[in-house]
Amino acid sequence: MRRLLFVANPFPPMASGGTARQLRFLRYLPEFDWQATVLTCRASGPVSPPADLRVVRTVTPSPEPLYGAARRATAAWAGWRRGRDTGHGGVGASPLPSRPGPDQRTARRELTNRWLFVPDPYVAWAALAIVRGLRLVRDEHFDAIFSSSPRGSTQLAAAGIAALSGLPWLADYRDPWPTRQFRVYPTPAHRRANFALERWSLGHASGVTTVNEQIADDLRRRYPPLASRVTVLSNGFDGSEACDAIAAPPGFWFVHTGRLYGRDHQVAAFLDALATLPDDVGVTFVGVDGRRLLAHAAALGIEHRVRVEPFGSHARALGFQRSAAALLLVTGLAPESLSGKIYEYLCAGRPIFAVTPDHSAAAALLDEAGGARRAAPDRLLTEALASFVKAARAGRIAPPDPAVVNRYDSRVLTERLATLLGEMVASSRD
C-alpha cells in the first residue's frame, strides 16, 4: 500500500462539520491501496477519532494569553474613558465594566484573531507541524501529502513539508482562503499577507481539489500555471454511517442541522414567514447557539414552534434529518456557497426548502438533483414557504434523483481521490 501524510486541522476530537469529509476519505482510502497517517494538533472535544487510525499530534500554542491581554486592555481603556467622561480622570476613577457576555467575548476574540494572526490563530501550530512532518518523512516512507482546509495554516503546514521534502502535495479546498466571503481584513496589509501566503503555498502544490466549480474557477483565474491541475472533488455522504432514532414531534416540523455562520438575516426572514403558517408548523435547529433564534421567535410569538437542540454526535444530527417532515437549508450569499450538509439532506430523501441565491452552487445542485424548492434570500419568504409546506404535505415534491445522489457517495468520491493521488505520484516520478 502507498502511504499518505494527511495534514488536518481541525480534526477530532474537535467538533467541526468539515471533518466529516476528511473522516470519510480516511475510512475508504485503504480500499484503494492508500494508508494514511494524520498529522494534526493536540485538542479536546466531544468527537471520538477513529480507533484504527494512526494520528500524530503536535503541541498547539494557545492564544489564550493574548486574549487575556486584549481583555485587560479593553477594560483599562473603558475605565479611562469613563473617568474622562465623569471628570475624575485616570483608569481607576470608575469601576471597570462588568464581565462581558458570550457574544462580546466571541467578538473580542474574532477581532484579536484578525489583527494578530495571519492567516489564522493556528499559524504557530503550522510551524511545529512542519518540523514534526519532516521528521516523519525522514524516518518513514511516504508517497504523497494531502491537506484539507479552510484554515490557511493547514495549507501552510503541508506546503512547508512539501517544499522541504520534495514529496508531491495535493491541496484540498473546502472553502476559499483569502477570498472567503466571511473573511474581514482589518488593514490592506493583512489582506496582502494572506494572498501572498496562499501564492507561496500553492507554488509547491502538485495539484488542487475543491468542493465546487466556483472555488475551482477562482483558483484557475488567479493561478493560471496551476489551472490544469485544479479538480473538483465534491463533498458527499456516507449512507452506512450510524443514525440515531429520533421521534418526530406532531405536526409539520422542519429540521436544520449544523452551524449558521452569521446567516442571521436569512434565518430571521424564515422565522418571519414561519409565523404566518398554521400553529402545527415548526422548526428544530440542531447544533447552534440558539439565543438569538429564540429571542426572535419570542418577539414573533412563536417560541413554542422553534426548538433548539444542543450540539451532539453526527449520528444524532443524521437522526434528526431523517425524522423531519422537511429540511431547511440556509446558505451564504457567495457563488461558492454549498454547505456540506446538502449531500446528507439529499441522502435523507426529505423535501428541502433552500434559502439560497439563484447563482449559488447549492442552487445548481438542487436544480439538478430535485427534491427541493428554492427561495432567494433577498425576498420575502412568506409565499414561497407557504407554497412549499402545502406541496410537501400533499406529497407533491418528488424525492431527489437517485442517479444524481449516488454520484456523491463517499466511496465513489474516495476512489476518485485515490486516482488523483496515484496520478500525482506517477507524474512526480517522471
Image: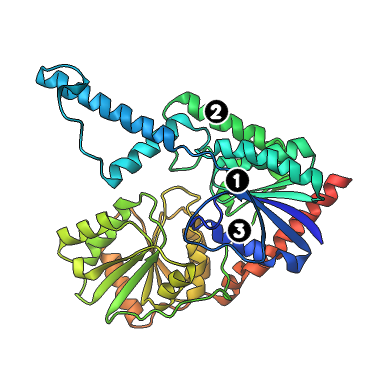
- The answer to which quarter of the image holds residue 325 is bottom left
Q: Which residue is mark 2?
A: 193
Q: Secondary structure at mark 1?
A: helix
- Residue 164 is situated, as x and y percent measured from the top left of the image, at 76, 35
Q: Residues within 10 Å of mark 2 (few under 14, many from 20)?
A: some
Q: Is 78 situated above or below 145?
A: above
Q: Nearer the viewer, residue 411 or 120?
A: 120
Q: Please tell me whether mark 3 sits on a helix, a strand or a loop.
A: helix
At horizontal 57% and vertical 35% (from top left) the residue drawn is 124
Q: Is residue 318 left or right of residue 57?
A: left
The numbered dot on residue 311 is none
Disc 1 marks a residue whose amino acid type is: Asp
Q: Measuring from the top left, give residue 219's x and y in whole percent.
A: 61, 41
Residue 70 is situated, as x and y percent measured from the top left of the image, at 36, 31
| Marks 2 and 1, how far apart at CA | 22 Å
Residue 429 seen in the figure: yes
User: What residue lies at 23% left-to-right and 77% top-to-bottom?
Assistant: 280
> The C terminus lies in which quarter of the figure?
top right
Left or right: 202 as drawn, with respect to 64: right
At 67% from the left and 42% from the top, the residue drawn is 158
In the rendering, which numbered label is found on residue 217? Answer: 1
Residue pictured at 16% horizontal, 30% vertical: 95
| SS under mark 2 | helix
Where is mark 3, residue-wise?
Answer: 22
For the residues carrying marks 3 and 1, which lies nearer the camera in this image? 3
